[in-house]
Amino acid sequence: MIVPMKKVSILILDAVRNVSLEKLRELGVLHLERKSVASDTLSKLIDLKNKAEGALGMVSNYTIDKKVVPPPGATEENTAAHVLELVDKRKTLQEHLILTGKEISRIEKWGNFNPAALRELSAAGVEIIPYELSAKSYAALTDETRFIVLGKDKNSVYGVAAGAEIDGEQPFTLPECSLSELNNKTLDIKTQLQDIEVQLGKLAYKKENIKAELAALKEQIEFETANASLEDADTGKVAVSWITGYAPEETAGVLKRAASENGWALLIDDPKEEDKPPTLVRNNALVRFIQPLFSFLGTVPGYREYDISPSYLLFFCLFFAMIFGDAAYGFILLIITLLVGSGYKKKSGKFPDAVKLFILLSCCTIVWGALNGAWFAIDFQYLPGFLKALVIPQFNSDVALSPFPGILKALFQIPVNQPSNTAYWNVQFLCFTTAIIQLVWAHTKNIKKLLPSLVALAQLGWLVMMIGLYFLVLSMLLQITLPGFAVYLIGIGLFTYFIFANQTGGNFALNIGKSFSNFLPTFLNAVSSFADIISYIRLFAVGLAGTSIAQSFNSMALGNGLSGSVGSIILKLFAACLILAFGHALNIVMNALSVIVHGVRLNLLEYAGNHLGMEWSGYSYTPFALQQKEKRQA
């Protein structure tokens, strides 16, 4: 449920500006209206926050050994500044190390000599000038040139010219110090870098201090942003300022009492059409399981959009189970989830909603897999009797052909020639039926939202058309005889949509003309709706692909049996275990990706986007509040 919001405006005296903001922050209910503000103080705080985040990211790269006693001073403040100081020093040393390495590479072919001695000789009038000549330049030297060769390689000649420079050649630039001194400098830099790494490792114990610094900076930034957001109100006599925001309707009483106690002028009103209030979604403990998925996807419904959490959770559980499709995979996921959840419970005392969601999804997968007789894609004939007893024959392709349920025969004209694999037919039928249920539910929500406007009848028309398209899909893909009324449903539904789609006021006939002027886009949307129903076949296709992959790995591992000598059997058994472990682990990972690609898509695109018209244009309700208070409420 999306919690109703009120737009709140508060007028305060400039004399008690900071005190009033402190009181407002203590209330922790007002989401301040977004404004672009700037101040020197705010800029400095943001810079400090960025540095603290960088320091936190840096120390997070170091593993804390819990057996080691934390170093002294682990609770001192300004840990972030200390970390950044070390990081800057490390960066400088690394740059020096690179430069020193380049200098060593440049002069090491000359050997270990003292450049200071050459400079002293030059100062005393003895010119000894080093050169690095190419082979061609060396060959071109005349007999008059006094050049002493010190070394050679395939490309160059190294030596010194005595008495005078060589015309047309650039002397070799002498280093500041000798090769041995550069090597010692390199060792010293590496020692300093190692010492910095040790210090940063010790500072990893102070990660919580940095987090506390960061939280305090965020509070200061929020407070300064609120302060900068205050607008001056010209009363002519008293200096006052005002601030606007949004608060849940249920907190209006709290704001009124606070205004009375602190002498604020308060205005509470419903948001106008042009306003964009934040979204606060509140659901019961079960429906709240889906919230971690929304957080992961970064999707927030707009304030005037729908909260689809209940329906999303219901259908996502079914989609997840059909895509994974294997009860054994469900048990593996359940065990992993419980182990991870136990670790969280030891720290916080409860299972996070994300863990609860995966427990629910795992259980749904187990139920679906058990009903299909899917256990590591093992052939039905090899399953124990108690697992066979759980199977619904219509959903298992290895069970002897079973007749269609009577309810299907009563509602649909089932094909005379029963398909060779009724399980596949039944699962496909379930996919299309799930599609029409979910999409009709979307248009039902639209009708409820639009009533009593005549535009609601347009949504009713589209709903009727969708039902007709559903029968058309069944006819085309499952060979169910197309009932005569299906064509009428499509035609009547589409016609009704054209009549009422633009009936928002004004001339009735003129509005109909506007609708028919959009004939082509509307027709394409109808075709898109037809494709949306067919799109749900992906649940069957992806589930079947996963089963086929699992069966392939089973055949690779066990296809040749375990005959032969004892050593051969042991070797084959070991290889089979590796193949099975790798194959099924890979299949689980691929199924997880398929859930994100297909299971999430059906809910967000086909259901919420195409038929509910949601744009996910909202932003979360984040009240102006103290961090400590937020933690207590959580």
Image (cartoon, rainbow, N blue to C red):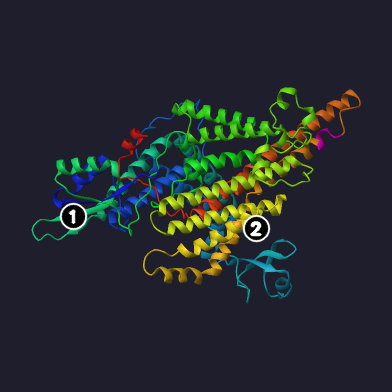
User: Can residue 574 be spotted in the picture?
Assistant: yes
Residue 66: x and y, percent? Answer: 50, 27
Query: In the figure, is residue 187 to the left or right of 537?
Result: left
Q: Which residue is more in the foreground, 33 or 239?
A: 33
Asked if residue 527 lies in the magenta stretch, the reply is no
* Residues shaded magenta: 555-559
Residue 191 is marked as: none
Query: In the figure, is residue 518 to the left or right of 322?
Result: left
Rate crowding at label 1 as few (under 14), some (14 to 19) or many (20 or more) other CA atoms within 10 Å. Answer: many
Residue 110 is marked as: 2
Rate crowding at label 2 as few (under 14), some (14 to 19) or many (20 or more) other CA atoms within 10 Å. Answer: some
Q: In the figure, 386 relative to 550: above or below?
A: above
Q: In the figure, 592 relative to 502: above or below?
A: above
Give the number of callouts: 2
Q: Identity of the amino acid at label 1?
A: Ser
Question: To which residue does mark 1 refer?
Answer: 241
Q: Which residue is more in the foreground, 440 or 208?
A: 440
User: Can residue 84 be spotted in the picture?
Assistant: no
Principal SS element in the magenta part? Answer: helix
